[in-house]
Image: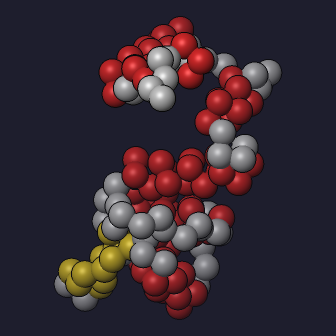
Amino acid sequence: MAELPPLSKREREIMDIVFARGSVTVTDLLAELSDPPTRSALRSLLTILEDKGHLKHGKQGREFTYRPTVARQEAGRSALSRAIHTFFSGSLGKALAAHLSDPGATYSEEELRSISEFIESKRKEHNRTTPPSATQNPSSTDSKS
């Protein structure tokens, strides 16, 4: 799936509610949003989110219902990828190091173990799929002249 356009703060707030509920109406959103806009302004925001490809709508009774077009995890992966490319020159290592070295952040032993296991799993996967010639020192291979 193509990467979806980024969201404004208000659009993210709306999408958080949509992801949490699965499906919402304008009335639902007005009840849950902090400092909600007018009904008309909210409908405009929902149209923008549809135009950006984040939402789709259907009709239920007299109101439209809005659903996300992608799963929350997929949307999160896309947003994380954009942040890594924007702030860390595309380096996952730099992003992870910045996050893990944040003095205000706390991690449970289970989270750290899970991260370590995932990295080890990816390392093994990489080693299985990388041809031996790609990891050999070029000066140690025989040349055919």
Image location (x, y in percent) of residue 17? 45, 59
Q: Residue at x 33, y 77 (%)?
A: 56
**8 with respect to 109 (left or right):** right
Closest to the observer, 26 or 66: 66
State the quadrant of the N terminus: bottom left
Image location (x, y in percent) of residue 10? 62, 68
**145 with respect to 66 (left or right):** right
Q: Residue furthest front?
A: 145
Q: Residue furthest right?
A: 103
Q: Residue at x 66, y 39 (%)?
A: 91
- Does any portion of residue 31 appear in the rendered image? no
Image location (x, y in percent) of residue 88? 72, 43
**22 with respect to 35 (left or right):** left
Q: Is residue 83 above or below residue 26?
A: above
- Does any portion of residue 22 appear in the rendered image? yes
Residue 62, quarter of picture: bottom left
Image coloring type: secondary structure
Q: Residue at x 48, y 29 (%)?
A: 145
Image location (x, y in percent) of residue 82? 60, 55
Closest to the observer, 109 or 97: 97
**113 with respect to 132 (left or right):** right
